[in-house]
Image (cartoon, helix red, strand yellow):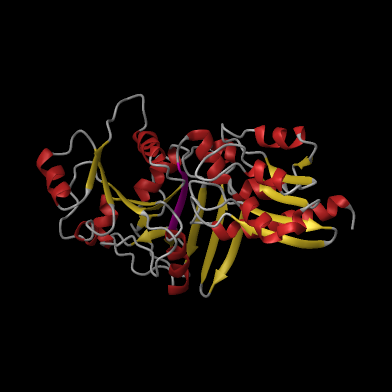
Amino acid sequence: MNEKQNDYRWMQRALTLARQGEGRVEPNPMVGCVITQGEKIVGEGFHTAFGAAHAEVEAIRNAGTLADGGNLYVNLEPCCHQGKTGPCTEAILAANIARVVVANTDPFPQVAGSGLAALAAQGIEVTTGVALEEAEELNAPYFHYLQTKRPWVIAKWAMSLDGKIATHRGDSRWISNSSSRKIVHQIRGRVDGILIGRRTAELDDPQLTARPPGPRTALRVVLDSQAQLSSDSQLVRSAGEIPLLVVTSEKAPAEEASRLKNAGCEVVKIEQDQTTNPLHALLTLLGKREMTNLLVEGGGNVLGSFLDAGLINEVHTFVAPLMIGGEGISAVSGKGIDQMERAYRLENCQIEQIESDMYISGRFPREKDS
């Protein structure tokens, strides 16, 4: 096996390790690291949690003296600044690593190529771009956050064969099967926020929690321009234990906003004008809270608004083998597109059968970021 093949093989291992930090490291990126001597791994590690040691430090610690003269593979450029942990570049130099192989450079302003430059200046051989596309895919939400200062938006819905998410009366329990719903709970357990509209909150009375709990407890977000969310809803009744953000407009009656605040909800007013899309303002607000991933669960009008604004990055859809017909509620409403050539098309689309359901997932091209 030649050097190029070896580099790719060990980088794939680093990416596999990195993914173990999903839901635990955000807003940091997922990073894995492998140290080799010849054809043998002598140390490996990954970033396990926000504030914990970085992957390179874990791998060097695991390798001990066997790191001396070895090759280090890491999917993201080593940091060179003092943050919650020390610079990884210093740990690499202290371990006398001979060669560093990296997939992505880190666009974080305090790194941005400086880590690689610092290593090269000390005589370490540096190779970049190995398994570049796979590494970009892994940390796409992190890169998106740095670029836009907004969370990566994941849209999820379950629908019938004829594209309905509920009957005309709003009944939607249950379209998808229990195995599909388990997948949804897994997604909920790794995101920073879960968003729905007030109408969905009213019809479904959801908890918007991960069951069983995942590594993160998501902030529950309800779009409610008039602050009409019922005090008897499961969301409001649990607001003291699980954070709930109610997003209103300037038209919301003050007494209704006070009612929700007194029940333990956080209430935020988003100003609306002719020049700024309120969803942009909301995502900017959530970005300031260092949210990396936001799950949008509907309903159809909310999903349509996000789609029309070009704000959906990733989609998870469950299609059940049933039909609703009539005036059932469409999965995605909004204005939509007027020409098929302008339709949003998923990349790297995955299709899986979950018992009787079809599970379709994928991402929109990153150039749709706005």
Q: Is residue 359 left or right of residue 222?
A: right
Q: Is residue 233 left or right of residue 157?
A: left
- Magenta extent: 151-157
Whether residue 81 is situated above or below residue 292 in the rendered picture = above
Q: Main secondary structure of the magenta part?
A: strand
- Residue depicted at 58% across the width and 49% down the height: 346
- Residue depicted at 53% across the width and 40% down the height: 144
Can you say which quadrant of the picture contains the N terminus?
bottom right
User: 52 or 306: which is nearer to us?
Assistant: 52
Instruction: Return the residue found at the far top.
Output: 275
Q: Is residue 20 visible?
A: yes
User: 79 or 155: which is nearer to us?
Assistant: 79
Residue 279's x, y, as percent? 37, 37
Residue 361's x, y, as percent? 55, 57
Residue 30 highlighted magenta (yes or no): no
- Residue depicted at 56% across the width and 52% down the height: 53
Whether residue 335 is situated above or below residue 69 in the rendered picture = above
Instruction: Return the residue found at the far left.
Output: 255
Residue 153 highlighted magenta (yes or no): yes
Residue 82's x, y, as percent? 54, 38
Residue 39's x, y, as percent? 84, 61
